Amino acid sequence: MVIFLAQQNYHIGNFESNTDKIIAAIATAKQQGADLIVFSELAVCGYPPRDFLEFNDFIDKGLECIERIRLVADTIGVLVGCPSRNPKPQGKNLFNSAFLLHENEIKGIAHKSLLPNYDIFDEYRYFEPAFDWQVMEFKGMKLAVTICEDIWNLTDDPMYRFSPMDELIKQSPDVMINLSASPFDYVNAESRKGIVQQNVLKYKLPMLYCNTVGSQTEIVFDGGSMAMDANGNIITQLPCFTEALQPVVLKDNGALVGAITCPAPLVPRVQTMPLQFEPTKSIDQVHQALLTGIRDYFGKMGFKKAIVASSGGIDSALVLALACQALGAENVTALLLPSQFSTDHSVNDAVELSKNLGNPYHIIGIKEIFEQFETALSPVFGDLPFNVAEENLQSRIRGALVMAMSNKFGTILLNTSNKSELATGYGTLYGDMAGGLGVLGDLYKEQVYALSRYINRNGTIIPVNIIEKAPSAELRPGQKDSDSLPEYAILDAILYLYIERRLGPKEIIAMGHDPALVARILKLVNTNEYKRNQFCPIIRVSPKSFGIGRRIPIVGKYLA
Amino acid sequence: MVIFLAQQNYHIGNFESNTDKIIAAIATAKQQGADLIVFSELAVCGYPPRDFLEFNDFIDKGLECIERIRLVADTIGVLVGCPSRNPKPQGKNLFNSAFLLHENEIKGIAHKSLLPNYDIFDEYRYFEPAFDWQVMEFKGMKLAVTICEDIWNLTDDPMYRFSPMDELIKQSPDVMINLSASPFDYVNAESRKGIVQQNVLKYKLPMLYCNTVGSQTEIVFDGGSMAMDANGNIITQLPCFTEALQPVVLKDNGALVGAITCPAPLVPRVQTMPLQFEPTKSIDQVHQALLTGIRDYFGKMGFKKAIVASSGGIDSALVLALACQALGAENVTALLLPSQFSTDHSVNDAVELSKNLGNPYHIIGIKEIFEQFETALSPVFGDLPFNVAEENLQSRIRGALVMAMSNKFGTILLNTSNKSELATGYGTLYGDMAGGLGVLGDLYKEQVYALSRYINRNGTIIPVNIIEKAPSAELRPGQKDSDSLPEYAILDAILYLYIERRLGPKEIIAMGHDPALVARILKLVNTNEYKRNQFCPIIRVSPKSFGIGRRIPIVGKYLA
């Protein structure tokens, strides 16, 4: 039996385009002799559809697409994800389902049992979990069809109460097929291989694993769909961060033959989050994820052009480099906005960067505008000394200038704040915190350095001086980040323990960190929740990004 | 048996202050002869604690407070809510629990079964539902203790699969006691009485219902705790939107005697959301909720003073009036920021308003700053015509000025955007969308008018001209809202059907609305998700507010 894995990039709620893409892949696979083609979880509507699922109309549209696909599923079988209605009066009114379409009929429906409801996931908000399971008969084979999390019950995470595969195995299936929408983060990509392998070894069956690819606002899906034989060898591995359609042959004896056979060594165990911060971890994949995040945000929002406030610092330099790689240098404008406190090298470095990248740039000084604000405010401010009000004002003048450019030329402002700054509130709301997409918001400063060096791996793109100089916001004479913040290596290590690992102050101090410093940093994180609450979506690359996956009360007093 | 209901206002994560407050109420109740005192759901840590629950340290701190309370629960019994750990290895690792403390011991623990996971609620993210139930013995009485949603299973909402009270009733309890954290909205306050009544009538038992009060960022709790006898009469009703401690006597025969007996007529049915938008619905309660929301946000954030950009329009006038009522006029500064497009009456109306309210105000013209921006941008903008870029720029100059004031004087900027504007994207990011708290973000424009008239019910506070003139953003000569938006009465009616009632375009058109207008409005709502995503917390007064309770994909293409 020839089975195709269709790893595709969908657009949430864009039923017509998603279905067109699905039908095109069916046609290609059929032409190449496919018996069955497998798509990913909720392929028809895109994942995650979030509260769109609360609209009856949205569910109707999905089911109408299933009807369209049914009409082309003639001699070829199609396994495709789509929300369906729960016919029973008890429980939530929807299932997260996989439809088997064949001979122009719906031959089977499987519903997801293990509904993730942590971090960025809210599936229990919408879906009823399945409590009965049936293998699907297809051309003499029994398919054990599960959806994403359904196969993750093998970890020792206590939140799993049962295993759908434990039930399905009783019906003697020939193969396991999993439809996923499993997001990228620098831990998950490896975990996933381990999970698939643990399943094939436990159930002594091959598995076809089909994941989605592409980004949906903040969530990046890396794909990495695969076929694994019952011995735990990867028989076919689809590429990461790109669409792909690949066949695998399932023999009657359960053996798998891949179009590209690439046996892999056994993955020793499921990867877990590193105990300590590792700035260079999976930096090549992080790079790909950020490019995907930028490219898809623009593509799906219907924009082509970006603008970046280029300060001569490392954060904006890295964002500019990434944007040029993702969108093409001709589509990325740099705006240099020096103030009276900007050093000459800042402008020179930013100009050199744009020359290296080949992207257009403009220089607009903000000194005169700032002075006009000072004049206007002087009747109220009187003789009060220069302080954070004036520092933030400069940042907000820059914000207003880049947004004026964005409005005038129809470009999206890319934000350059990094995770260390966002965590500690070292940024100005409506100033340097402005923008449509947070490119570096899930990278601590040490990761910003690591990725900048990675960008320069084949030759200097980001000028060395930008990487090596001491970081500064340049909002007052001689200002350095280190005036207000501890050294980034220490700061990042503590932030990682608090944010990613969710350790409390006692536990962090017990790991050898200075108690006063820990208290100071954790208080900064907590009291700046109100700023992050107004921040744009961040491209997620870690297991715990600021944004929809981290929900902290704003007026909370904990640890503050 | 004398039972006190303690309706208190907690601060999330402020264990020490919450526990001090609980212990003080215990002392007062004991002095007044109480046998038992009942506090609300998760009283010890405040509700909702959200991802703070993922910190072991946070759970430890709650349990330490239970230990503190246990030491004072000697002859008096105490029922108090606190998270507890699930000792079993299966399932989530926490319960949402109620502790019965008496004779300095933990005499019983009840866990919540029905975990809300819709709108603003995420309880299934953290808690394991309880599947076994035991009445608690206390001084010869059997208490059926449930937590909030546990008693809401009587509606025909299919999401409830079972009823904890159906199980508890088998153990012949003498009284039902419910610990709640049930938020205010203009539907819920009435629904709650109906739910309590349906329970007492079904189980033929009296119920003591203790709700929390006060606001937690966006969520307002109105209290309204009550005791209801087995016939459905309200025996004691605690006041709304304020802390209270009141006794009720439970006789051995199950009769309830209230300190204030106020029998109420039977509530005919559970209230549901109105089918059509009703701008004046519960406007007095909405008023109280907004005052609570402002007051507690400032109190819990540790701020006293507010600033409002006062344009002479109705939205800013209403916010200014509410802020003066909530915080005191001396604590609220109005900033009047006329441009070259502002009409004379705008400034005059805004001045008259502040004179009526007695709050300080300043006038700062923005014309010169705007011109300086134009000069700076002219090398890039060239001869391109005045458009939305220049309109937004004026709004952002105002944003920068009020934020400079906010930073210089340590005040919080109150945002004045209403729900109709936020829905349609009729506002400028980092301009009039700036601010720490969205006071009117859950009120459609017609509700803004209704509440303004309500504010003026005993005499003119908001000048009549402000209420009666045609609304305008005044960002270009002669601009009116009606140039860009349909008449507010029609706009609000359609928005309500889409946002609150979650009807799709077909259903809204079937109700008699113009198809082209419906398509235009729904597209505006969908394509402006990215703006709302960066908006500040909104004081929630409706069953569906923008913010944490409404989760729509930003790059989604549905209906757009």
Image (cartoon, coloured by chain):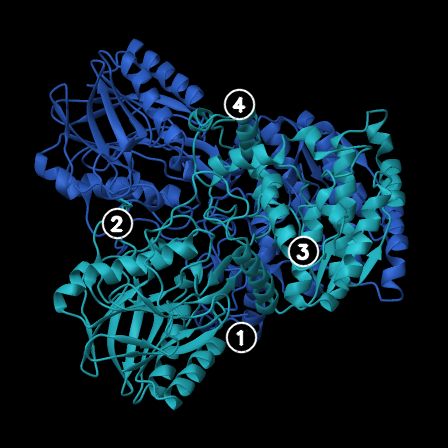
Chain colours: A cyan, B blue
- Going by the numbered disc 1, the residue's amino acid type is Pro
Closer-to-camera residue (B13/A280): A280
At which x and y percent is residue A87? 24, 67
At which x and y percent is residue A529? 55, 38
What is the chain identity of the residue bearing mark 1?
Answer: B
CB atoms of marks 3 and 4 within 8 Å:
no
Q: Please indicate, yes or no, whether residue A278 appears anywhere in the rendered image.
A: yes
The C terminus of chain B lies in quadrant: bottom right
SS at circle 1: helix
Let me know if marks 3 and 2 both belong to one chain.
yes
The residue that appears at 63% across and 48% down in the rendered structure is B417
Cα gap from disc 3 to disc 2, whole angstroms:
44 Å
Q: Is residue A190 above or below residue B344?
A: below
Q: Report which quarter residue A22 is drawn in.
A: bottom left
The N terminus of chain B lies in quadrant: top left
Q: Which residue in the structure is indicated by mark 3?
A: A456
Furthest toward the top, the residue is B31
Q: Which residue in the structure is indicated by mark 1?
A: B515
- Going by the numbered disc 4, the residue's amino acid type is Asp
Closer-to-camera residue (A451/A384): A451
SS at circle 4: loop
Q: Which residue in the structure is indicated by mark 4?
A: A514
Give the number of the disc on residue A160.
Answer: 2
Let me know if marks 4 and 1 both belong to one chain.
no
- Going by the numbered disc 3, the residue's amino acid type is Asn
What is the chain identity of the residue bearing mark 2?
Answer: A
Cα gap from disc 4 to disc 1, whole angstroms:
64 Å
SS at circle 3: loop
Give the number of the disc on residue B299.
Answer: none
At which x and y percent is residue B313? 71, 47
Q: Is residue B86 above or below residue B65?
A: below
